[in-house]
Amino acid sequence: MIGLIIRRLMQLPIILFAIYTITFCLAWLIPGNPLQNPEGRQPPPEVQQAMLEQYKLDSPWRFYWDYLGKATGISWVLGAHDRPFDLGPSLTHQDWTVNEILAAGLPVSITLGLLAMLLACAIGLTAGVIGGVKPGSAADFATLLIALIGISLPSFIIGTVLLLVFGVWLKVVPIGGWGGVRYTILPAVTLALPFAAYIARLTRFGMIDEMSSDYVRTARAKGVPQRQVVLKHAMKNAFLPVLSYLGPAAAMAMTGSFVVEKVFAVPGIGTHFVNAVLSKDLTLIMGVVLVYSTMLILFNLVVDVLYRWVDPRIEMG
Amino acid sequence: MKILAPFVLILAALMTVVYLDDAPPRADVVFVDTAEVFTLDPQRMSWMQDFRMAYALYEGLVRWDNTDFSIEPAAATWTVSADRLVYTFIIRDDAKWSNGDPLTAHDFVYAWRRAILPDTAADYTAMFFAIAGAEAFFNWRAQQLEAFAEQKAELDPQARAKAAEALWRRTEQQFEQTVGLEAIDDHTLRVQLVRPTVYFLDLVAFGVFYPVHRPAVEGWALNDAITAQMRQHGWKRVDEPDFADREFANLNADTGRFEQKHGWTKPDRFVGNGPYVPTHWRYKRGLRLGRNPYYHSPDRVASDSIETISIDDINTAILAFESGRVDWLSDVSAEYQADMLAERAAYDLRYADRIESMLANGRTVDEALAALPPPESGERRNIHTFPTFGTDFYSFNCRAMLADGRPNPFADARVRRAFVMSVDKQIIVQRITRLNEPVSTTFIPRGSIPGYVSPEGLPYDPERAREELKAAGWVDRNGDGLIENAQGEPFPVIDLLYSTNTPRYKNISLALRDMWRRGLGVRVELRGKESKFFKDDLIQGNFMIGRGRWYGDYGDPTTFLDLFKTGDGNNDRGYSNPYVDGLLAQAADEPDPAKRMRLLEECERFLFDEEVPMLILCQLVQVYMYEPGKLTGLSHHPRLTQYLWQVKVVAP
């Protein structure tokens, strides 16, 4: 286990370097000038040149090495820069540094993502167990139907409907923004629904399998009550496929909430993935990608370790 | 149930995080602007929502009156010399910064120097070239920096840092000696202009000319003694700290540049001289303003606090407005806006007589609407359209050759006239955009500049359009419904470029394609691109006809007509005509305002009666949402420069 962790951690910088290089090449190839307001007036060419030089955008080579040094902290170690892990100023939001932007948005995205995952587990497991214990029953049919809706309806429709009902008609939640529990409920529910639906289906099939297996029959023969058979024996094993899904799902919930963030005006990171690219905000693109890749790699590592701890039969390279 | 324990723990931790991250109570006025505020540094601004903040957080020497846009004194009164070349501003004695320091003439010299320095690289640098010596100084500094960067390799780091500092001292001297900007004493600022720029005060009222507080901007390390001294006389009388003691400013030893960081715009470091100061600013959440305790005229300020919140999605913003969380939406660009406007039209129609009689009695539109019974279902009175100081148009590429080297048919003015006269603009604003914008034939919105008379422009006349094409040699010679030239070559397929950030331009482009195919017998291919890509193609002249839009910055025809100068940075059309260049140059040197206006009128007449480098569609409109009678203080003037300190929510 320790060997696994050490090996993965040693791979981290190499993977990150590759990601950095590929992202940089792609981002640099986006046409246009990030310092330019496409709808506004263009400053004289000398001023535009001065702007580019100021942000080292006049040469890809210069930007690439300069940014790499500052972002990793190597420049700081060498004494060429005053602080480590400096992701630079945002090129479009000039009053903010990328560090400030990430510090403001990451906690929000992580909180929202994790809350949504908890909700998804609670809803999905309950529905899956109810359906899986008695397949073909009315309860099973109802949960399947709800799961189908959860998977097929896009979040911007679910989100807008929820806002309309709870925000405009019932006036129980404020619309748009973040800060306090009342702002959190609707986006978390909207984000959770598709995951909950998927988890429900995974659990249902798992339960159907486990319920017809030998050890469940033995338990029943011994006279163990149904409640205990389901919760103590069958569910534990039915949970395994869900666990392996939770890793990537949690990562997705924390990164891929672009639509939910937009609909509910949540100040998270998801929107930067799209907006930074559209405005060719190089420092922000690189910063977001670097921080997120690091998080993803570490996250996958945690899930792998957990998985092996739960099920020691699994071998990992 | 052991398995539940970690989940409960995580949940508890998350709820604590959420609970601690609580939002402050609602501000007196809450609004959603077009986009996120980019910067609070007035010299770097170039977006509408940023300038709105400039007018709330700073105060310039003069200000536009918000109803008719005449100039009124703000932080200063002024006198003009007889030859209109020297302006003298007297700064009011009670003008103070938000930290209590006095506002002095040196603050303006510093802010304007900042804007002129190539080191700052401000979008609006060129506006300051109206000041004598400013352009020469800009070029001098740029050259010095270039030379510095070349010779630095020979020096060791320490010597380089010294050389950079020496160059900076020389630059400061050069500015003082050559630029016509002088603080005669703490309260008197004298400005010498290159030529009699009749609209100079209009420029001075523009946000980029607003002052900044040097010790705050540069992040000076201060002690109590210096602070007390600055309280008395401002920063000019204290010694400048070394660059090492300036948190937000330094000299780059490699490039010699004066580098500025932006940390000073955050609420805890900010110093301004306007009615408000920022009290909370959280990225992508909101920017809240509270009263500046040192503002000289607190009774002018209508609300104690005002907040702009970030809601990107217009549907959510409209829901937020409907729920009462937001008092004003400044840009309602939802796809169903036309349906909402139809509801407003239905309401207006039902009460047309009463509205008319109230307007005749001198009430404003908002007052009249507020006095009427509430709208029934299918009606609304909280959406409003205003014509703006901007024009929607399509550019013709006027270069002799296209980007791919083919000859350009639109280099011929006759072809351009034909394309303009075959477009029925009324259909476009009624059926395509459905906003009923005022259609237009001239670039400068008609009647928007006092003393300026717009020319006729070209009408919708398909018959004349075909004649123009015939005169240019394009006729259908083989009866296939498409036009050919004398050699029998068909008219090139037209490359029509538009941006895809809103559906508006796709829809208009489709309509134009049909009008030109039916009216002129030409084939048009649409090329929609995301706005950055679109702008890139436009700048490189890689298009035949391209979508465009322009808003004026100041109240003078040149804010529009300068686009047609040969080589102007915003001349996407590549248009060049010595007659136009000559008229603009002549107008720039003309001291008599009336004569100058006649020259500019002739310039626009020549451009839009004869040359038509653009197909002008309409005056742009802005769609606001607010409850009339509940929110007051918004200006309806086409410039739509809203002064936030005039805005107030009165009892509903």
Image (tube, helix red, strand yellow):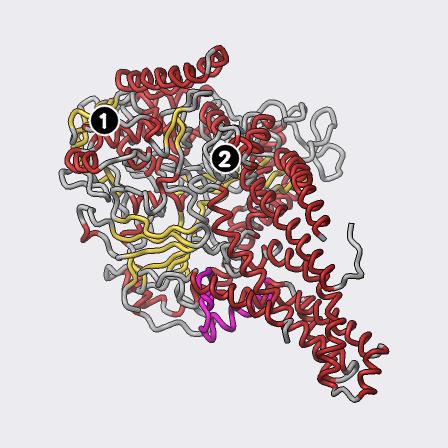
A14 displayed left or right of B647: right
Q: Nearer the viewer, residue B175 or A6?
A: A6
Residue B320: x %, y % from top left: 45, 64
Residue under label 2: A36
Q: Which residues are magenta?
A: A156-183
Q: Quadrant of residue A290?
A: top right
Q: CA distance from mark 1 to mark 2?
A: 37 Å
Q: Is residue B21 left or right of residue B642?
A: right
- Is residue B421 visible in the rendered image? The answer is no
Q: Residue A63 appears at what percent x and percent y?
A: 56, 29
Marker disc for residue B239: 1
Q: Quadrant of the C terminus of chain B?
A: bottom left
Mark 1 residue crowding within 10 angstroms, few (<14) / some (14–19) / many (20+)? few
Quadrant for residue B44, please give it.
top left
Toward which corner of the image does residue B161 lie, by quadrant? Answer: top left
Most foreground residue, B124 or B111: B111
Q: Position of residue A304 (x, y in %)?
A: 71, 56
Magenta span includes A226:
no
Q: Residue at x 66, y 65 (%)?
A: A195
Q: Is residue A131 left or right of residue B61?
A: right
Q: Are marks 1 and 2 on the same chain?
A: no
